[in-house]
Structure formats: C-alpha cells, structure tokens
Image (cartoon, rainbow, N blue to C red):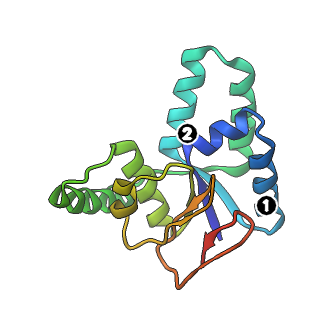
Amino acid sequence: MTYLLDTNIISYLLKGNTTMLQKLDALVEDDNEIAIPSIAYYEIKRGLIASGASTKMLRFLRFVEEIGVAELTTTTLDVAAQVYAELKKSGKLIEDDDLFIGSTALEHGAILVTNIVSNAQTKALAPVCFCYNALWMALHTKHTKCTTGALAPVCS
C-alpha cells in the first residue's frame, strides 16, 4: 500500500512527535510505500526557509531522500479540475493546496494520512473512504470497508 503524508503530519514528524514516529515506523516495517505530495514538500520547505529553521530543514531533506516525493502531474491537475468543478457546483470549495494534495493521493491510489477533517474535505474527494480516530484520517479511492491497521484506521 502507498501512503502519502499530508503537510501537518510531516510537521509533527519534524517536531519529533513520538506517536507519529512510531506509526510511521510501523508502516515502514510492513513494507508499505511512503511519500510526500509535492505540494506538501513546498509547504514544509517554504515554512522552514521563512523561519530560518536550518536544523529542521536538514532533517526534512534527509527524510525526503529516504521516502521520496509524489510529483504533481497533468493527471493530478485533471483530477483536481474535475473535483473542483464538482465542489463549485455544490458550493463547497476547498483550498487549492488541499485539493492538489488530495488529488495526488487519488491519482496514485494512495492513502492520504492527515489530521485535518472538515465537511468540505469529506465531500471533496468522493468517492473515497474517510476513517477517523483522534489524530489520523485515511482516504483511498478503491475500498470495500474501513479496517484497523498500522495507522488505525485505514481503508482497504
């Protein structure tokens, strides 16, 4: 399974959040693929540059070298354009960065790991499976049911 880490999850990891680190380790141990959407890469990098956080920047760049970046492609943009049109019709637009990150997950058939939950986002990326616990939300384009896994919960 492929997991894409949202900007907020990467931020927790850079701050050394032990819960996040343990969950990431569990995913890696289970031979899952982990990546960062290119928009999340941009969001983290711009924040680190703006704040002059050179130590976190080095940690971030090493982390990216290990897991990689899921690039924004024309297919991603096509998915995003379709979702945007549906959202506009329903009057429930979301920010472009969230739209691009979610569309990257959809394009790659990946589970997006984030802690941002809102009604607009829940409806934005349908058909996807949204599963909640206190900190994790997973989305996946092909699913039959929600189950508990390393990230607890994830979609299958």
Residue 70 lies, with reference to residue 65, above or below; the image says below
Closer-to-camera residue (91/34): 91
Q: Could you tell me residue 99's position as x and y percent?
A: 37, 51
State left or right for residue 25 relative to residue 112: right
Closer-to-camera residue (102/76): 102
Kindly identify the residue that appears in the image at 78 percent across and 68 percent down.
31
Q: Residue 141 carries which label?
A: none
**Residue 50: which quarter of the image?**
top right
Name the residue beneath numbered marker 2.
41
Q: Residue 28 carries which label?
A: 1
Kindly identify the residue that appears in the image at 52 percent across and 26 percent down.
46
Residue 155 lies, with reference to residue 77, above or below; the image says below
Mark closest to the chain's N terminus, 1 or 2: 1
Total residue callouts: 2
Kindly identify the residue that appears in the image at 18 percent across and 54 percent down.
91
Do the residues bearing badges 1 and 2 touch, measured as CB atoms within 8 Å? no
At mark 1, the secondary structure is helix
Residue 139 lies, with reference to residue 96, above or below; the image says below
State left or right for residue 124 relative to residue 116: left
State left or right for residue 19 relative to residue 50: right
Q: Could you tell me residue 109's position as x and y percent?
A: 51, 70
Q: Could you tell me residue 12's position as x and y percent?
A: 68, 39
Kindly identify the residue that appears in the image at 25 percent across and 63 percent down.
82
Type of amino acid at the residue the image marks with label 1:
Val
Type of amino acid at the residue the image marks with label 2:
Tyr
Outermost residue toward the bottom? 144
Residue 123 lies, with reference to residue 97, above or below; the image says below
Looking at the rendered image, the quarter that the C terminus falls into is bottom right
- Classed neighbour count for the residue bearing mark 1: other residues with Cα under 10 Å, few (<14), some (14–19), many (≥20): some
At mark 2, the secondary structure is helix
Q: Could you tell me residue 52's position as x and y percent?
A: 63, 14
Q: Distance between the residues labelled 1 and 2?
A: 20 Å
